[in-house]
Image (tube, grey):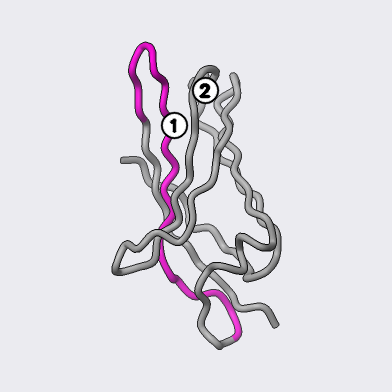
Amino acid sequence: MNRLPAIKVVQGEPFTSSFTLTGQDWTGYTGTVSYKKAPQGEEILETDATGDALGEVTFDLTAAETDAFPAFPVIGYRKVGVYQVRMTQASPEDVQTFQGDLHVASAV
Protein backbone atom coordinates (compact mmCIF):
# COMPACT_ATOMS: atom_id res chain seq x y z
CA MET A 1 0.00 0.00 0.00
CA ASN A 2 1.31 3.41 -0.96
CA ARG A 3 0.99 6.40 1.37
CA LEU A 4 -0.62 9.66 0.21
CA PRO A 5 -0.62 13.07 1.92
CA ALA A 6 -3.54 13.94 4.18
CA ILE A 7 -6.50 15.64 2.54
CA LYS A 8 -8.37 18.52 4.18
CA VAL A 9 -12.11 18.75 3.57
CA VAL A 10 -14.57 21.36 4.83
CA GLN A 11 -17.98 19.97 5.70
CA GLY A 12 -20.59 21.10 3.15
CA GLU A 13 -18.09 22.44 0.57
CA PRO A 14 -17.03 20.81 -2.72
CA PHE A 15 -13.58 19.23 -2.78
CA THR A 16 -11.12 18.10 -5.48
CA SER A 17 -7.77 16.37 -5.14
CA SER A 18 -5.23 14.63 -7.36
CA PHE A 19 -1.88 12.90 -7.24
CA THR A 20 0.54 11.76 -9.92
CA LEU A 21 2.48 8.53 -10.15
CA THR A 22 5.28 9.31 -12.60
CA GLY A 23 5.65 6.71 -15.35
CA GLN A 24 2.22 5.12 -14.71
CA ASP A 25 -0.42 5.04 -17.47
CA TRP A 26 -3.88 4.73 -15.90
CA THR A 27 -5.64 4.16 -19.25
CA GLY A 28 -8.04 1.21 -18.83
CA TYR A 29 -8.09 1.40 -15.02
CA THR A 30 -11.22 1.85 -12.89
CA GLY A 31 -10.77 3.90 -9.74
CA THR A 32 -12.66 4.07 -6.45
CA VAL A 33 -12.11 6.14 -3.33
CA SER A 34 -13.36 4.91 0.06
CA TYR A 35 -13.63 7.33 2.97
CA LYS A 36 -13.70 5.62 6.39
CA LYS A 37 -14.04 6.75 10.00
CA ALA A 38 -11.17 6.13 12.40
CA PRO A 39 -10.62 4.03 14.41
CA GLN A 40 -13.64 1.82 13.62
CA GLY A 41 -13.06 1.73 9.87
CA GLU A 42 -16.78 2.26 9.21
CA GLU A 43 -17.28 3.44 5.63
CA ILE A 44 -18.65 6.94 5.26
CA LEU A 45 -18.73 7.18 1.48
CA GLU A 46 -17.36 5.67 -1.73
CA THR A 47 -16.83 7.64 -4.94
CA ASP A 48 -15.06 7.27 -8.29
CA ALA A 49 -11.53 8.26 -9.24
CA THR A 50 -10.20 8.78 -12.76
CA GLY A 51 -6.70 8.34 -14.05
CA ASP A 52 -4.98 9.48 -17.24
CA ALA A 53 -2.10 8.45 -19.48
CA LEU A 54 0.26 10.88 -17.73
CA GLY A 55 -0.13 9.17 -14.34
CA GLU A 56 -2.51 11.66 -12.71
CA VAL A 57 -5.39 10.34 -10.56
CA THR A 58 -8.20 12.80 -9.77
CA PHE A 59 -11.13 12.49 -7.37
CA ASP A 60 -13.72 14.94 -6.11
CA LEU A 61 -16.67 15.36 -3.80
CA THR A 62 -19.82 17.45 -4.01
CA ALA A 63 -20.94 19.76 -1.20
CA ALA A 64 -23.66 17.23 -0.29
CA GLU A 65 -21.07 14.43 -0.05
CA THR A 66 -18.71 16.38 2.22
CA ASP A 67 -21.68 17.29 4.41
CA ALA A 68 -21.88 13.57 5.32
CA PHE A 69 -18.39 13.63 6.87
CA PRO A 70 -18.14 13.77 10.66
CA ALA A 71 -16.53 16.87 12.13
CA PHE A 72 -15.72 18.09 15.62
CA PRO A 73 -17.46 21.27 16.84
CA VAL A 74 -14.19 23.21 16.96
CA ILE A 75 -12.36 25.58 14.63
CA GLY A 76 -9.87 23.93 12.31
CA TYR A 77 -9.20 20.57 10.74
CA ARG A 78 -9.20 17.36 12.79
CA LYS A 79 -8.35 13.84 11.68
CA VAL A 80 -11.59 11.87 11.52
CA GLY A 81 -10.56 8.94 9.35
CA VAL A 82 -8.70 7.72 6.29
CA TYR A 83 -9.25 7.65 2.56
CA GLN A 84 -8.18 4.86 0.23
CA VAL A 85 -7.80 5.08 -3.56
CA ARG A 86 -7.89 1.79 -5.52
CA MET A 87 -6.98 1.72 -9.17
CA THR A 88 -7.94 -1.58 -10.82
CA GLN A 89 -7.23 -2.96 -14.29
CA ALA A 90 -8.90 -6.20 -15.39
CA SER A 91 -6.44 -7.39 -18.04
CA PRO A 92 -3.66 -7.84 -17.30
CA GLU A 93 -4.84 -7.91 -13.69
CA ASP A 94 -3.39 -5.08 -11.64
CA VAL A 95 -4.64 -3.44 -8.44
CA GLN A 96 -2.82 -0.51 -6.87
CA THR A 97 -3.90 0.90 -3.51
CA PHE A 98 -3.04 4.27 -1.96
CA GLN A 99 -4.07 5.56 1.45
CA GLY A 100 -3.91 8.78 3.46
CA ASP A 101 -5.46 10.57 6.42
CA LEU A 102 -8.80 12.40 6.17
CA HIS A 103 -9.01 15.72 8.02
CA VAL A 104 -12.36 17.53 8.24
CA ALA A 105 -13.30 21.00 9.43
CA SER A 106 -16.86 21.78 10.43
CA ALA A 107 -18.68 24.45 8.45
CA VAL A 108 -18.66 27.82 10.20
The image quadrant where one finds the C terminus is bottom right
The image quadrant where one finds the N terminus is top left
* Magenta region: 75-95
| In-image side of 82 versus 107 (left or right) | left
Furthest-top residue in this view: 92
Task: Name the residue beneath numbered marker 1.
Answer: 87
**Number of on-image labels:** 2
| Majority secondary structure in the magenta region | strand
Q: Position of residue 59 (x, y in %)?
A: 59, 43
Task: Name the residue beneath numbered marker 2.
Answer: 26
| In-image side of 94 versus 65 (left or right) | left
Q: Position of residue 9 (x, y in %)?
A: 60, 64
Q: Are marks 2 and 1 in contact (CB under 8 Å)?
A: yes
Q: Position of residue 10 (x, y in %)?
A: 63, 69
Type of the residue with mark 1: Met
Q: Residue at x 63, y 53 (%)?
A: 61
Q: Is residue 51 above or below residue 37?
A: above
Crowdedness near tag 1: few (<14), some (14–19) or many (≥20) residues, C-alpha within 10 Å = many
For label 1, the SS is strand
Type of the residue with mark 2: Trp
Q: Earlier in the sequence, mark 2 or mark 1?
A: 2
Q: Position of residue 102 (x, y in %)?
A: 47, 62
Measured in 3D between alpha carbons, the distance from the residue under mark 2 to the one under mark 1, in whole angstroms, is: 8 Å
Q: Is residue 53 above or below residue 102?
A: above
Crowdedness near tag 2: few (<14), some (14–19) or many (≥20) residues, C-alpha within 10 Å = many
